[in-house]
Image (spheres, rainbow, N blue to C red):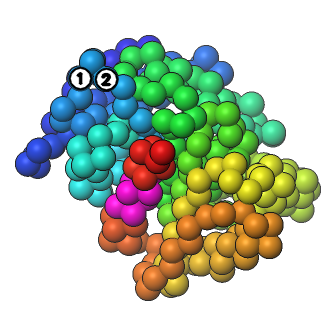
């Protein structure tokens, strides 16, 4: 596991930005991630960590390049932000049909220990959160629901929280098999069907989706199902589509929410 050279961003009071390379034993390959630290980062204290996941077709650098103000929230809330590479269409799960795709294992069993081993982090679910956009919104909730021992808070922005209406999109069938042949894989790996893993108050949750987004209906459906089960969560909806201007705004609320979770009594 190697550190790559640090990057800099041209903003006042800018956070410190590293690009790190980790080796995934599960997938036998090197994977990059961006790590954003507060400008005042010090070895004399520990920091909470937010894992921030990218969407389909993007990579680990997407957030810092397309919404660079996200780095300012590391300073604002004194937290570390980690942007992993989830490949262009991993959906952040371990594929049941292709053993080369093990991104759930990578994030939960390889990346988190690396970050905790190389940075001054709070190594507990009370100091660890995860969120993301689109495919990454699905991934954040999926990983948090399945690993509540690792994450205390989770969020989603324009998340693909129910993949079943989109059986031919984003190469999901390459990871799960076709819906016609392997419906159980799709049913088992869609976030909307995983609410049985939650109990009221088990996770702090924030879900955000624009009213013009093609994922809007599945997010409203998830919200309704959470209400039925008395799963406490914040649900934000406002005009907007599946666009970077929307996510650049939404991420500010996500980071504020995570900060409130980290600093609660």
Q: Nearer the viewer, residue 3 or 205?
A: 205
Q: Is residue 120 above or below residue 246?
A: above
Q: Position of residue 183 (x, y in %)?
A: 89, 58
Q: Is residue 151 visible?
A: yes
Q: Nearer the viewer, residue 210 or 176?
A: 210
Q: Residue at x 18, y 35 (%)?
A: 39
Q: Nearer the viewer, residue 247 or 255?
A: 255
Kindly state the secondary structure of the residue where label 2 is placed: loop
Within the image, what quadrant is residue 81 found in? top left
Within the image, what quadrant is residue 2 found in? top left
Q: Is residue 167 visible?
A: no
Q: Residue at x 24, y 37 (%)?
A: 38
Q: Is residue 257 above or below residue 42?
A: below
Q: Decide whether the magenta segment is chiefly helix, strand or loop.
A: helix
Q: Residues within 10 Å of mark 2 (few under 14, many from 20)?
A: few
Q: Is residue 136 above or below residue 241?
A: above
Q: Residues within 10 Å of mark 1 (few under 14, many from 20)?
A: few
Q: Position of residue 104 (x, y in %)?
A: 65, 36
In this image, 70 relative to 123: left or right?
Answer: left
* Magenta-highlighted residues: 252-258
Q: Marks 2 and 1, Cα distance to the nearest angstrom?
A: 6 Å
The residue that label 2 is drawn on is: 45
Q: Is residue 253 magenta?
A: yes
Q: Is residue 249 magenta?
A: no
The residue that label 1 is drawn on is: 42
Kindly state the secondary structure of the residue where label 1 is placed: loop
* The N terminus lies in quadrant: top left
Q: Residue at x 40, y 49 (%)?
A: 259
| Labels 2 & 1 near each other (Cβ < 8 A) | yes
Q: Position of residue 245 (x, y in %)?
A: 33, 71
């Amino acid at each position: 596991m190697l550190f790559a050279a640090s990057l800099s961003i041209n903003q006042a009071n800018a956070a410190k930005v590293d690009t790190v390379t980790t080796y995934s034993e599960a997938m036998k390959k090197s994977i990059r991630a961006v790590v954003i630290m507060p400008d005042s980062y010090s070895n004399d204290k520990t920091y909470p960590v937010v894992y921030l996941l990218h969407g389909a077709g993007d990579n680990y650098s997407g957030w810092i390049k397309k919404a660079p103000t996200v780095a300012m929230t590391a300073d604002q809330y004194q937290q570390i932000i980690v942007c992993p590479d989830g490949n262009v269409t991993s959906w952040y799960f371990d594929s049941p049909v292709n053993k080369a795709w093990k991104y759930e294992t990578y994030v939960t069993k390889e990346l988190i220990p690396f970050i905790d081993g190389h940075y001054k982090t709070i190594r507990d679910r009370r100091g660890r959160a995860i969120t993301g956009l689109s495919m990454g919104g699905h991934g954040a909730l999926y990983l948090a629901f399945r690993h509540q021992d690792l994450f205390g808070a989770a969020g989603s922005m324009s998340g693909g929280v129910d993949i079943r209406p989109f059986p031919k999109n984003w190469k999901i069938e390459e990871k799960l098999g076709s819906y016609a042949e392997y419906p159980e894989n799709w049913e088992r790996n869609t976030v909307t069907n995983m609410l049985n893993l939650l109990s009221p108050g088990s996770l702090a949750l924030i879900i955000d989706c624009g009213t013009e987004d093609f994922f809007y209906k599945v997010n409203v459906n998830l919200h309704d199902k959470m209400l039925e089960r008395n799963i406490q969560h914040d649900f934000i909806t406002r005009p907007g589509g599946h666009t970077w201007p929307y996510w650049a705004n939404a991420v500010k609320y996500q980071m504020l929410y995570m900060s409130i979770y980290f600093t609660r009594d």
